[in-house]
Image (cartoon, rainbow, N blue to C red):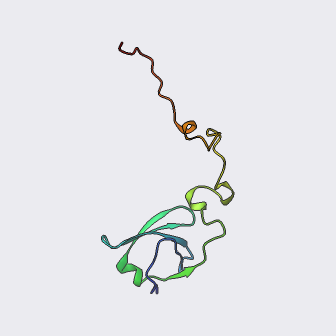
C-alpha cells in the first residue's frame, strides 16, 4: 500500500511486478500521476488508485537516465558546432540572403 504522496523525482517499485519507476509529474487538477519506468515507458496513474497500490519507495537505479535515451557517460558531450563559448555571436546562425536590397 502506497501511503506516501508522490513527488516528482522520487523512485518507487511495484512489489507485485518488481517494476521500477520514477514519478515525473503530479497533476492534482486532473487527479493523475505521470510516471516513467526505468526502460523509458511512460504511464499515468490516477491519484485515487495510488493509495490502494502496492508501490514502495526505492532507490534510483545506477543509471537512472537510461529511460531518457542516453547513458550516464553521455550526459555532457561537447557540442562540435559551437567552438567559442565566450563569444555569444558565435552561436548566432547567419541569415542567408539570396536576393537584392532595395536601394
Query: Where 70 sits versus 34, above or below?
Result: above
Q: Position of residue 101 (x, y in %)?
A: 39, 16
Query: Where 11 sits versus 103, above or below?
Result: below
Asked if one can make out residue 86 in the rendered structure from this viewpoint, the answer is yes
Looking at the image, the residue that sits furthest to the left is 29
* Nearer to us in this view, 27 or 79: 79
Q: Is residue 42 left or right of residue 87?
A: left
Q: Is residue 73 left or right of residue 68?
A: right
Q: Residue at x 64, y 40 (%)?
A: 84
In the figure, residue 40 lies in which quadrant?
bottom right
Asked if one can make out residue 15 in the rendered structure from this viewpoint, the answer is no
Q: Residue at x 61, y 55 (%)?
A: 70
The quadrant of the picture occupied by the C terminus is: top left
* Nearer to us in this view, 40 or 84: 84
Q: Position of residue 37 (x, y in %)?
A: 53, 67
Q: Position of residue 22 (x, y in %)?
A: 52, 70
In the figure, residue 33 lies in which quadrant?
bottom left
Query: Where 47 sits versus 89, above or below?
Result: below
Q: Residue at x 55, y 73 (%)?
A: 19
* Nearer to us in this view, 58 or 99: 99
Q: Residue at x 65, y 65 (%)?
A: 63
**Number of residue marks:** 0
Query: Where 82 sits versus 74, above or below?
Result: above
Amino acid at each position: 500500500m502506497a501511503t506516501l504522496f508522490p513527488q516528482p523525482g522520487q523512485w518507487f517499485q511495484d512489489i507485485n511486478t518488481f517494476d521500477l519507476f520514477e514519478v515525473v509529474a503530479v497533476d492534482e487538477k486532473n487527479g493523475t500521476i505521470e510516471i516513467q519506468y526505468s526502460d523509458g515507458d511512460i504511464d499515468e496513474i490516477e491519484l485515487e488508485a495510488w493509495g490502494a497500490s502496492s508501490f514502495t519507495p526505492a532507490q534510483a537505479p545506477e543509471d537512472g537516465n537510461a529511460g531518457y535515451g542516453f547513458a550516464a557517460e553521455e550526459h555532457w558531450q561537447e557540442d562540435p558546432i559551437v567552438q567559442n563559448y565566450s563569444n555569444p555571436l558565435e552561436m548566432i546562425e547567419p541569415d542567408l540572403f539570396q536576393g537584392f536590397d532595395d536601394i
